Image: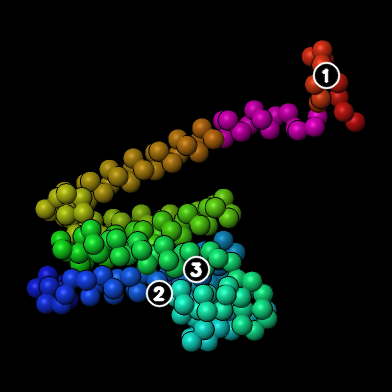
């Protein structure tokens, strides 16, 4: 399936178009993940619907990029505005997938697809973090597992030629990555706690530097 000769039989930029369209389609699914994961909802069912009136969106009104533009960012059923974030995620995903193909397609279609999956996870994590200040465990731990598995299947991702060397490098990456995140977490808590020790509004400063409690 990923034989380079098979992929090379088709013009390179035909696959560029395929990756762009595929990225937009995946971006539509990523929007579902971004909206539902923080709410603890299933990303499989129910089908896509308007968050305002719950109108179930038919397939012909769920075309990535095109639908949002044609409907001018509004629900066809109730007319409520649909966030531009939906369009931006689809466009960003399409560009990211195209970029992966242009960067790695001549090397290996499989490597390009693996990087597409990696960037898709980053897109979900980024937009969820912007809105909710969290990163879902499904992305964090799922990404760790997927990265480790991909390193075993394609050792060249780690600059290795054997699965043993790739496994070693992957474990090292997991340990270093987890260590950096843990350090940032502990440092953040250490900085926040002193600020929380004195509640805002508990004291007011006077011109002469005196303090008095506020009732």
Q: Element type at marker 2?
A: helix
Measured in 3D between alpha carbons, the distance from the residue under mark 2 to the one under mark 3, in whole angstroms, is 11 Å
Q: How many marks?
A: 3
If you read the primary sequence from the N terminus, does the residue marked by circle 3 or circle 1 appear first? Answer: 3
Asked which secondary structure carries label 3, the reply is: helix
Q: Residues within 10 Å of mark 3 (few under 14, many from 20)?
A: many
- Residue at left 46%, top 77%? 66
Q: Report the Cα–Cα distance between label 1 and label 2.
A: 59 Å
Badge number at residue 87: 3
| Front tag of 3 and 1 | 3
Task: First in sequence, mark 2 or 3: give its number.
Answer: 2
Q: What percent of the width, then of the height, locates residue 103?
A: 23, 58
Give yes or no for residue 192 being in the magenta stretch.
yes
The quarter of the picture where the C terminus appears is top right
Residue 33 image point, x, y percent: 49, 67
**Crowd band around label 1 with a 10 angstrom C-alpha radius: few (<14), some (14–19), many (20+):** few
Where in the figure is residue 13, as x and y percent of width and height? 22, 71
Q: CA distance from mark 3 to mark 1?
A: 51 Å
Q: Can residue 76 be seen by looking at this rendering?
A: yes
* Residue that badge 2 annotates: 25
Query: Answer yes or no: do the residues labelled 3 and 1 have beta carbons within 8 Å?
Result: no
Q: What residue is at 46 percent from the left and 73 percent from the top?
A: 65
Residue 98 belongs to the span the image colors magenta: no
- Residue range corresponding to the magenta coloring: 189-202
- Which of discs 2 and 3 lies nearer the camera? The answer is 3
């Amino acid at each position: 399936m990923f034989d380079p000769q098979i992929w090379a039989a088709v013009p390179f930029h035909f696959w560029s178009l395929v990756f762009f369209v595929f990225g937009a389609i995946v971006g539509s699914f990523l929007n579902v993940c971004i909206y539902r994961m923080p709410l603890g909802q299933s990303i499989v069912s129910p089908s896509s619907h308007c968050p305002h009136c719950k109108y179930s969106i038919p397939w012909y009104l769920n075309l990535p990029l095109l639908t949002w533009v044609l409907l001018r960012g509004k629900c066809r059923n109730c007319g409520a505005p649909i966030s531009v974030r939906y369009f931006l995620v689809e466009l960003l995903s399409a560009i990211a997938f195209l970029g992966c193909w242009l960067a790695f397609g001549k090397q290996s279609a499989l490597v390009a697809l693996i990087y597409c999956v990696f960037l898709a996870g980053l897109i979900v994590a980024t937009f969820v973090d912007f809105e909710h200040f969290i990163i879902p465990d499904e992305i964090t731990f799922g990404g760790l597992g997927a990265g480790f598995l991909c390193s075993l299947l394609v050792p060249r991702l780690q600059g290795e030629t054997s699965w043993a060397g790739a496994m070693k490098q992957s474990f090292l990456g997991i340990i270093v990555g987890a260590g950096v995140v843990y350090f940032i977490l502990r440092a953040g808590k250490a900085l926040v706690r002193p600020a929380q020790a004195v509640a805002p509004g508990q004291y007011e400063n006077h011109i002469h530097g005196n303090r008095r409690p506020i009732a």
